[in-house]
């Protein structure tokens, strides 16, 4: 698993599967989940300033006994810290919370406010070695068309909602020309019963002696998408990683691609959603 990686457009490599810790509490639960994941074999951990659990992630990394250079750590800058000067402080805060000298990947969490000012701070932090790779999150084709021409360094990653029912095909095609890797949040559809109970997926899972979640995660990897399933139960954490001993056939991949509805739960271009997110504060 540790050797299964995708190459980014800046020459760095990212593991194809990671642990997401969105909405996992700090001061214990995140620490236990990350420690269990690292001991199981995960080497990509995805957090964010807005998740308020960076300190638990850093503590688990230190306590794991695994060399720092073997672990790919991602965090994200929140909207409250957009703008050039604010973003420089936000980067320093994330590093301090994590207790790390550098982050492997740092993303702009949402595409609102002074995006370009914040991006300039990320570019400088990359050049200074504080961040190995920089990227974006929740950016659509329209939003990317606005910002990409004004960026000195291209994003290495765009982390977006993606699963078999919402495959972001147009976005992925657009990003391919720039070598931008797609990362999926909610890769299992946030527990969508219709998705997890889909007869096609159930049939494929039975064929390989896997569960539906494992089939979905395997589909992501074979599509070239980094998947970030959230889990806190050690059995679920281990199960999500157990996807490297089988391959979906071309026909099975096509049948899953045909499930796309083009509809997700979050529309980054929705102005009401943008206003709500911009009002969310993570510090005084």
Image (cartoon, rainbow, N blue to C red):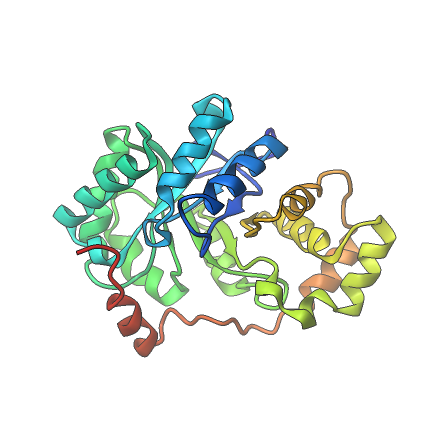
Figure quadrant of the N terminus: top right
User: Is residue 281 visible from the viewing direction of this image?
Assistant: yes
Left or right of 259 in this view: 277: left
Left or right of 271 in this view: 116: left
Residue at the outermost left position: 85
Q: Quadrant of residue 2?
A: top right
- Asked whether 42 or 248 is in front, the reply is 42
- Asked whether 256 or 211 is in front, the reply is 211
- Asked whether 180 or 198 is in front, the reply is 198
User: Is residue 10 visible from the viewing direction of this image?
Assistant: no
User: Residue 24, percent across and down?
Assistant: 46, 52
User: Residue 86, percent across and down?
Assistant: 15, 49
Left or right of 112 in this view: 170: right
Q: Is residue 222 above or below residue 269?
A: above
- Asked whether 170 or 83 is in front, the reply is 83
Q: Residue at x 67, y 52 (%)?
A: 219
Residue at the outermost right position: 207
Q: Residue at x 52, y 40 (%)?
A: 32
- Give the number of marks: 0
Residue at the outermost front position: 28
User: Residue 55, percent across and down?
Assistant: 35, 40
Figure quadrant of the C terminus: bottom left
Q: Residue at x 74, y 57 (%)?
A: 212
Q: Is residue 67 above or below residue 113?
A: above
User: Residue 51, percent across and down?
Assistant: 37, 53
Q: Is residue 104 above or below residue 152?
A: above
């Amino acid at each position: 698993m540790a050797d299964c990686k995708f190459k980014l457009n800046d020459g760095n490599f990212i593991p194809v599967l990671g642990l997401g810790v969105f909405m996992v509490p700090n001061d214990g639960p995140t620490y236990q989940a990350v420690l269990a994941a690292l001991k199981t074999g995960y080497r990509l951990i995805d957090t964010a300033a807005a998740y308020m659990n960076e300190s638990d992630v850093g503590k688990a990394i230190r306590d794991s006994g695994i060399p720092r250079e073997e672990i790919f750590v991602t965090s994200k800058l929140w909207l409250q810290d957009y703008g050039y000067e604010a973003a420089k402080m936000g980067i320093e805060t994330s590093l301090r919370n994590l207790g790390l000298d550098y982050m492997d990947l740092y993303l702009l969490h949402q595409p609102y406010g002074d995006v370009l000012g914040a991006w300039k701070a990320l570019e400088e932090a990359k050049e200074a070695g504080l961040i190995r790779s920089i990227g974006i999150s929740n950016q659509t084709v329209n939003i990317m068309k606005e910002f990409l021409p004004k960026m000195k360094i291209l994003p290495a990653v765009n982390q977006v909602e993606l699963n078999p029912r919402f495959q972001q095909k147009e976005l992925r095609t657009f990003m391919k020309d720039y070598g931008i890797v797609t990362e999926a949040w909610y890769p299992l559809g946030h527990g969508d019963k219709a998705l997890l109970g889909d007869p096609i997926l159930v049939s494929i899972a039975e064929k390989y002696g896997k569960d539906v979640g494992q089939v979905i995660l395997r589909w992501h990897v074979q599509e070239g998408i980094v998947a970030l399933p959230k889990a806190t139960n050690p059995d679920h954490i281990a199960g999500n990683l157990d996807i490297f001993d089988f391959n979906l056939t071309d026909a099975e991949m096509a049948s899953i691609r045909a499930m796309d509805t083009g509809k997700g739960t979050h529309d980054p271009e929705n102005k009401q959603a943008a206003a709500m997110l911009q009002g969310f504060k993570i510090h005084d």
